[in-house]
Image (spheres, rainbow, N blue to C red):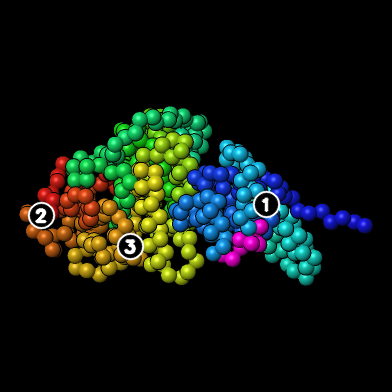
Amino acid sequence: MIREELPPHDVEAEKAVIGSLLVDGEAMFKVATFLEPEAFFTQEHQWIYNACFGLYQRNEGLNQITIAHELAKRGKLEETGGAAYLSHLVSIVPTSLHLEYYAQIVSRLSVMRRLISAGSQITAIGYQTDAEVDASISKAEDVLFKVRQKKSQQDFVPISQVLGQYFEEIGSVESQIEEIPHILTNFAALDNFLGGLQRSDLIILAARPSLGKTSLALNVARNAAINQKACVALFSLEMSQQAIVQRLLANEANVDSSHVRRGDYTEKEEREIMEASGILSEALIYIDDSPQIRPAEMRGKARRLHFERNVDLVIVDYLQLIRGDSRGDNRVQEVSEITRALKALAREINAPVLAVSQLSRATEWRASHRPQLADLRDSGSIEQDADVVLFIYRDEVYYPTEEAWKKDHDIEKEPYPKGIADIIIAKHRNGPTGEVKLRFHARTAKFKDAGIELSPD
């Protein structure tokens, strides 16, 4: 009699993972970013871990009682062995110290099972003798790609590592010890208005495309990390690590960004770039360029980095690219969940969260293109959840030449605003609203103080 061999699995490791979470629910953030319920081989363990994940996503307490209650609500408590089985799992794991080790075992074996499944699918493709060879190979590659994609979880990468890839050398970063009371943008007029970026605040930075949202966010990241030695977690959903680093290098070296992107620069520019690289290598900027990340993943990654490095500022670029945890078609509800999650993250790690956001096209249809709170895309919950809302507006985008400007303005009273960016403080929960001016240098995508501050409302 031939005994059928079961796919790779480790029931004891699965028990240890769940037992560790029952002992220490706060440790969930250590595994939430890479371990999914489907990774468990045993159906009962999938149900229990799924209940844990549900509580974690809702930011509710995670312990033996709440998990039992969650399983009962889902009609799965008795099927998983009841409260007695949960007590058994607690009894076999004295501490959550090795949670990540056990979780990696469960995750690795689930990948191997998917690989076995992929092999069966590829075998079936190979038996389709009437199919085109190229099409069959393409299908087989797609099957393997899905396995690799599932395994390849992106995580934070220190800027020094990305710079090392750019120059084929690795920089180093040093840990931050003392907590910074608030994060300064290092734009004097803006800091005077806001008193810096306050811990636990959600700050929305919004504008239409090509007005400099990402540039200003990166300027703030650079200023905080270098001038205040702050630890910055940067989620870049639109741009790759390399593109982010190239922008920062151009900014720091004051070199045309297109030269840095192409690697085509003069000897003088090369010296400036190398000097800038040395400065940036010391910055505690951690970049995660995972596309379409979910709030739960973002929370887990930020908490893990905070646990290791004490995060002082989180930047998200940009809000509309975050994937909601709900599976409905209601985008307004989805964005509401995302902004609530970002606000909860700010409070949880006690750090400001600066989220870049797109504005609706309504600004393009008005005679005055200056943005308003109603222009925030997808829902009013962005305005509701935010502590501060900042808009970027540049007249020169809508009046690209001085001649165009003269048609609607008195040039003597209102000189052409070349390189002037208006930063509109449209909402400030704990202070005044108003407007400040900065200078924007498009060649290096760099903002600077303009030395002008308008009176607050």
Q: Amino acid at mark 1?
A: Ser
Q: CA distance from mark 1 to mark 3?
A: 38 Å
Q: Which amino acid type is shown beneath numbered disc 3? A: Ser
Please state if 260 lies on the left or on the right of 180 as rendered: right
Q: Nearer the viewer, mark 2 or mark 3?
A: 3
Q: Which residue is mark 2?
A: 414
Q: Position of residue 76 (x, y in %)?
A: 61, 63
Residue 372, percent from left and from top: 23, 62
> What amino acid type should be assigned to the residue bearing mark 2?
Glu
- Residue under label 1, please give it: 110
Residue at point 39%, 31% (across, down) = 176
Report the mark closest to the observer, 1 or 2: 1
Of 114 and 263, the residue lying toward us: 114
Q: CA distance from mark 2 to mark 3?
A: 37 Å
Earlier sequence position, callout 1 versus callout 2: 1
Residue 248 picture location, percent across and down: 38, 40
Mark 1 closeness class: few <14, some 14–19, many ≥20 residues within 10 Å: many
Left or right: residue 432 versus residue 146 is left
Residue nearest the observer in this picture, 16 or 318: 16
Q: Residues within 10 Å of mark 3 (few under 14, many from 20)?
A: some
Q: Earlier in the sequence, mark 1 or mark 3?
A: 1
Which secondary structure lies at badge 1?
A: helix
Give the camera-side residue of 197 and 156.
197
Q: Is residue 241 visible?
A: no
Sequence order check: which comes first, mark 2 or mark 3? 3
Assess whether mark 3 and mark 2 are in contact (beta carbons under 8 angstroms): no
Quadrant location of the N terminus? bottom right
Q: Secondary structure at mark 3?
A: helix
Which residue is under mark 3? 381
The region drawn magenta spans 74-81
